[in-house]
Amino acid sequence: MRATVVVPVLKSRSRGGQTESASTRTPESRLDEATGLAQAIDLNVVNASIVSVNDPRPATLLGTGKIEEIKHLLDERDSGLVIVDHPLTPVQQRNLEKEWNAKVIDRTGLILEIFGRRASTKEGTLQVDLAHLNYQKGRLVRSWTHLERQRGGGGFMGGPGETQIEADRRLLQDRIIKLERELEQVVRTRQLHRAKRRKVPHPIVALVGYTNAGKSTLFNRITGAGVLAEDMLFATLDPTLRRMKLPHGRTVILSDTVGFISDLPTHLVAAFRATLEEVLEADLILHVRDMSDVDNQAQSADVLRILNDLGIDEAEGQRRILEVWNKIDRLEPEAHDAMVQKASTMQNVIAVSAISGEGVDRLMDEISRRLSGVMTETTITLPVDKLALLPWLYDHAVVDSREDNEDGSVTLELRLSETEAAELERRIGHGQKPAKEDWER
C-alpha cells in the first residue's frame, strides 16, 4: 500500500516567551523513525514530511492550510494511507479521514500493527491482542457518530435499552477479560519456568535497548544463536533465552527482549509487562545503544524511563546496568577513536561493534567480572559411581585441572560460587543428575 508519513512538530511556550519544540527528539530523527516503522510492515512510503503545528486544533490537530496541502499531496501520489506520528483522538482521526478521503492511523495504531505482525508465540499474540482491544475500546466513536441508535430494552424493567456503542464497548470488554485470563495462565507458566531456573544457579543477563539498537545481532555474536537480526524496527518481539559459557568458565543465561521506543503506549507496556519481567529478574542488564544514531541520548532516556516504570530506578540501575555502546563500526575513524577512548574512562560502559566483533571480548570479560562474585577454590575426587556429575561440574564451575586416576576416579581442581558449592554438596550427597529442563525452559 502507498503511504504518506506526517510528523507534526508541536510548539510550546517557555517561560521566557520563546517558542520551542515540545519534543526532546529532532524532527528529522522522528521522520526517519516513522518512515522506518511504516517500512517495517512493507508499506510503500511515497511521501514523508515534517509539519509545524503552532496551534493544535482539537478537531483535527492540524490547521486547515496544512490539511489542504496534504490532501493535494495524497491526490498527486495516489496515497490511500496517512500515518500521523503523534497520538490522535478518535475525533481527530475521524475528521482527518473525512478531509483526506484516506485511511488515517496514529503512532500507537502503527506500533500495534507492527507488534501484531511480529508476534509468533502464544504469549506474544495474547499481549498484542489485549493491547489492541484496549486501544479499540477508546476509539469506538469512530464507528458510531449517531450515538442515539439503540437496541430495545428487555427484561422486567424494559426501558430504552443500550446504545450500539455501549453494546460494542461491552463486547470488547468481555473479550478483554477473556484475554486477560488467558494471559494470566501464560504468566503463571512463565513464573514456574523462572522458579525452575532459580534452582540451577545460573545468573541471568538481559539485553535491553531502543528498537534496532543491535540487541539481536549482539545476542547472536555472543551465543552463536540464529535469532532474527535485521536492520528493521521491532525485528524481535518475543523473548529468547540461551545458555552460554563466559570466558572464565561460568555459565549464564542470556535473554534478548523486545526493543523499546519513545511514546510507547501505556497499555502496550502493561500488556508486555510479563515479558519485560524477564528484565526485572536479571542479575545484570546490558543496555545496548546505537551510538551511530544522532538521537541516541534521547533514545537512552526513553529506555531508562521505561525501566524506571518497571521498578528499576536510578540507584538500582547504577548497580545492575552496564551500557554497551554498539555500532561504533559505523562511525568515522576520528569519531570512532574518540568514542572508544571515552568509553574506556567510564566505569559502566563498553564500546563494541556486534557486526565486526570489536570490543566484544572486553564486554565478555566485564560480564565475567561482574558475575563472578566470591569464587571458592577446592579440589575434589569423584569416585566412579559419581562420575555422572562431571557434565554438571563443567557447566557450573570453572575446572582448572583434571586428573584421571588409575582406579577410575577423577580429581578436579575447581573454582565455584558459594551457591554452586552448596549445590555440589547436595548432588554428591544424593547422587542426583542435573536437570536440563531447569534452564532450557
Image (spheres, grey):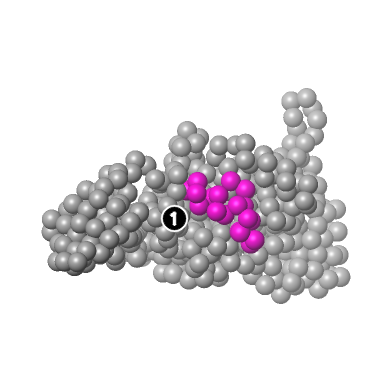
Q: Residue at x 31, y 49 (%)?
A: 416
Residue 345 belongs to magenta span: no
Q: Residue 253: x percent and y percent?
A: 40, 57
**Secondary element at tag 1:** loop
Check disc 1: other Cα within 10 Å, few if <14, some if 14-19, many if 20+: some
Quarter of the image that includes the N terminus: bottom right
Name the residue that disc number 1 marks.
Answer: 246
Is 355 part of what is drawn in magenta?
yes
Which image quadrant for residue 231?
A: bottom right
Name the spot of residue 354 as percent of width and height, x first. 61, 59
The residue drawn where x is 58% and y is 66% is 229
Q: Position of residue 140 (x, y in %)?
A: 55, 60
Residue 132 in view (yes/no): no
Work out whether residue 239 or residue 7 is closer to the camera in this orientation and state it. Answer: 239
Residue toward you, 55 or 421: 421
- Residue 3 falls left or right of residue 348: right
Q: Which residue is painted at 52% across and 44% down in the image?
A: 322
- On screen, residue 274 versus residue 91, left or right, reads left
Question: Which residues are drawn in magenta?
Answer: 350-367
Q: Is residue 233 visible?
A: yes
The quarter of the image holding the C terminus is: bottom left
* For residue 15, above or below residue 213: above
Q: Position of residue 326 (x, y in %)?
A: 63, 52
Toward the front, the furthest residue is 406
